[in-house]
Image (cartoon, rainbow, N blue to C red):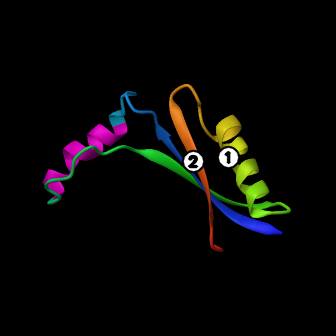
Amino acid sequence: MNYSVVVEVTLRVGIADPEGATIERALPALGFNGVRSVRAGKMFRFDIEAESSDEALTSAQSLAERLLSNPVIEDATARLVEGR
């Protein structure tokens, strides 16, 4: 069976996020006041074939940790989603 997966990769707490800081500084000039604590990250979306949703999620999480992120400085979270 095919399962759709979304993986979110973000910098770990305590790791400097210059991209997020740059975005946060630019927001008031664009009229977005009151936005704080901006953090940038990456999102990956793919389909995975597995026997069950648990197996799909386990495989996706392993893939996220081993290939899509740097586990020293990033956290990766996989979740199943409905279709594309």
Report whether 38 appears left or right of 28.
right
Label 2–label 1 contact, CB within 8 A: yes
Quadrant where the C terminus sits is: bottom right
- Mark found first going from the N terminus, 2 or 1: 1
Is residue 24 magenta-colored? yes
Q: Amino acid at mark 2?
A: Thr
Question: Quadrant of residue 38 in the image?
Answer: top left
Q: In the picture, which quadrant includes the N terminus?
A: bottom right
Q: CA distance from mark 2 to mark 1?
A: 7 Å
Residue 16 % position (x, y): 36, 28
Quarter-wise, where is residue 62 in the image? top right
Secondary element type, mark 1: helix
Q: Which residue is mark 1?
A: 61
Residue at 33% x, 41% y: name it. Answer: 20
Residue that label 2 marks:
77
> Picture coordinates of residue 61 (x, y %)?
67, 46
Q: Name the amino acid, label 1.
A: Gln
